[in-house]
Amino acid sequence: MNTPSTPRSGPLTGIRVLELAGVGPGPHASMMLADLGADVVRVQRPGQLPAPGTTPNQQLRGRTVIELDLKEPSSVETVLTLLERADVLVEGFRPGVTDRLGLGPDAALRRNPTLIYGRVTGWGQDGPRAQEPGHDLNYISTTGLLHAVGRKGERPVPPLNLFGDFGGGSMFLVVGVLAALVERQFSGRGQVIDAAMVDGAPALGHLLWSMRGTGQWSDDRGTNIFDGSAPFYDTYECSDGRYIAVGALEPQFYAEMLRVLEIEPDSLGPQRDESGWPHMRSVLTERIATRTRDEWAQAFDGVSACVTPVLTFTEAESDPHLARRSTFVEIDGVVQPAPAPRFSRTAPAVPLAPPRDPVPADEVWA
């Protein structure tokens, strides 16, 4: 069980975070902060912890949980009292919800003017859609990113929920929290962070916008260098139905790829001549289909060709490189990613298992 006295390690040791329970990017951002050593206390409704014998939500690792009904004035006062001793608050409700509860930025900063008040939403705190519901797919559909993902002449393909929820949402909230903590050292003042997925997701795609501005990126899906249109930057099926990823963008890597594949460069024409790409793709497809994925993986092992096997989650657990770096850890019987990034002096410990029992609120940060 995680308790208020549980030892922590990492560069954020000593930072206190109060998380108002939600789903998606808020819990993920709080997990990241806890992974880096912050003391994260999650406030959630009574009865939400897993029943005995069931597996808890692994995204709640490293937390202490207290149970409060925020519709009760006494619970709101308890949260405000905790905020007096907190460094950061994280919430992911629709705009206005915490204000109506009496826990909005004005109320929180009155109690603690040095508080970093982190808010993460899809649409942001203002704008015409601020009060509308939505999910990752909706947020990235309005930023141009979803339109760019897919094959030429085919419909856009959902790229999991990484662009919006976690890339554009939680990770930008974490960046905002860390930046505000640094600024607070000089000003002595807290502030409010408005982390919107419709802001963060486009920032992740800045390179593509930059290329578009110089005429190197087209709105025509499936015709751009990073979207699978280039035959030397795509995936290919092998003889066993599994795949390899080819990322041979630079000429030297492309040459090495052809060498291992035993394909004469002159038979394909210039690498960047788009008129020859259909023929190039046909040759690569036919050649790669002659061997299994693992045979190609062995052939390209140690070769500077940017060709790698496409692994499943299960296979990734035992990949030699990832295993050497301990990229995955087992917590509470569940294999999951380890904290990232790495630190030379203040290395985070393996996160504690998600809490199974609540802690009395009056024992937190006492």
Image (cartoon, rainbow, N blue to C red):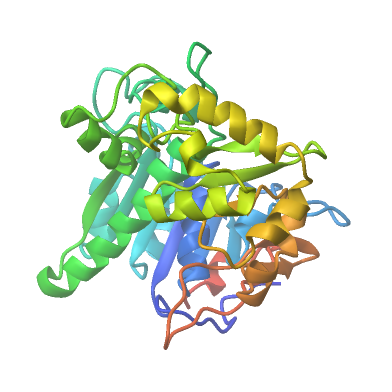
Horizontal side of 301 relative to 183 (left or right) equals right
Query: Looking at this rendering, what residue extends furthest in the top direction?
Result: 153
Q: Where does residue 185 sit, x and y in percent of width and height?
A: 18, 74
116 or 349, nearer to the observer = 349
Residue 190: x and y, percent? 21, 61
Q: Is residue 172 left or right of residue 7?
A: left
Dividing the picture into quadrants, the one containing residue 219 is top left
Classify the position of the N terminus by image quarter.
Answer: bottom right
177 left or right of 133 in image: left
Closest to the observer, 327 or 122: 327
The answer to whether residue 330 is above or below residue 47 is below
Identify the residue shown where x is 38% and y is 50%: 250
Considering every residue shown, the one lying at the far left of the view is 187
Give percent across and percent down for residue 134. 46, 23
Asked whether the viewer can see residue 139, the reply is no
* Front in this rendered view, residue 172 or 323: 323
The answer to whether 61 is drawn above or below residue 274 in the figure is below
Give the residue at x 41% y 46%: 249
Residue at the image point whose x is 63% and y is 59% from the top: 300
